[in-house]
């Protein structure tokens, strides 16, 4: 129960941060990505803030024997840059640039009952489903 409550608290705090930084506003994000046009650099502060917290805390946190709210840390053991990673990153970036929504802000947008966010989250899950079908088909052949 404690893990669920901390997950809820963390997600809520993260969502509030996204809303306050206006990362839930697709126009703000698109203007940030538009380097050749009406570039809005204000989201750099959000990114640098997140990077600073990560750099300062991750090395200390990962020295612990386990998580505060679970038995272990769940970290990826992959370190190779492979074709699926590059293709997935490209598709992610294209979708982000076209819509102005990253997955996290689109989920936060659900709380604001934003129809664009609903469409985006549905599209994300459609992508998850399509990838699962593709994975199953490639294993069968």
Image: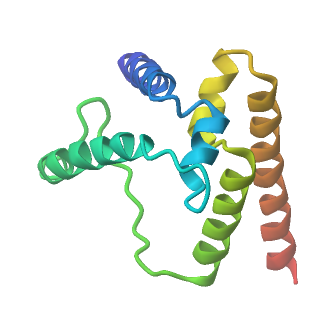
Percent of width and height locating residue 9: 40, 18
Residue 78 vs residue 30, the one in the foreground: 30
- State which quadrant residue 20 falls in: top left
- Horizontal side, residue 24 vs residue 61: left or right: right
- Horizontal side, residue 92 vs residue 65: left or right: right
Residue 61 vs residue 140, the one in the foreground: 61
- Res 27 visible: yes
| Residue located 15% across and 54% down the image | 59
Percent of width and height locating residue 115: 81, 24
- Horizontal side, residue 67 vs residue 9: left or right: left
- Res 72 visible: no
| Residue located 17% across and 44% down the image | 57
Percent of width and height locating residue 128: 75, 52
Q: Is residue 45 above or below residue 33?
A: above
Q: Is residue 27 above or below residue 52?
A: above
| Residue located 79% across and 53% down the image | 127
Q: What quarter of the picture does the C terminus occupy?
A: bottom right
- State which quadrant residue 72 falls in: top left
Q: What quarter of the picture does the N terminus occupy?
A: top left
Q: Is residue 74 above or below residue 78?
A: above
Percent of width and height locating residue 62: 19, 51
Residue located farthest toward the front when viewing the structure as drawn: 37
Residue 102 vs residue 48, the one in the foreground: 48
- Horizontal side, residue 114 vs residue 69: left or right: right
| Residue located 74% across and 15% down the image | 113
């Amino acid at each position: 129960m404690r893990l669920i409550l901390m997950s809820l608290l963390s997600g809520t705090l993260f969502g509030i941060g996204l809303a306050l930084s206006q990362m839930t506003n697709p126009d703000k994000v698109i203007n940030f990505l538009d380097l050749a046009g009406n570039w809005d650099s204000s989201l750099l502060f959000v990114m640098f803030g997140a990077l600073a917290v990560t750099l300062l805390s991750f090395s200390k946190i990962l020295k612990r024997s386990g998580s505060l709210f679970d038995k272990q840390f769940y970290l990826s053991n992959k370190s190779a840059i492979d074709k699926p990673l590059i293709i997935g990153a490209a598709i992610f970036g294209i979708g982000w640039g076209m819509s102005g929504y990253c997955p996290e802000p689109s989920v936060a947008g659900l709380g604001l009952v934003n129809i664009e966010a609903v469409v985006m989250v549905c599209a994300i899950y459609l992508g998850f489903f399509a990838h699962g079908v593709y994975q199953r088909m490639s294993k069968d052949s």
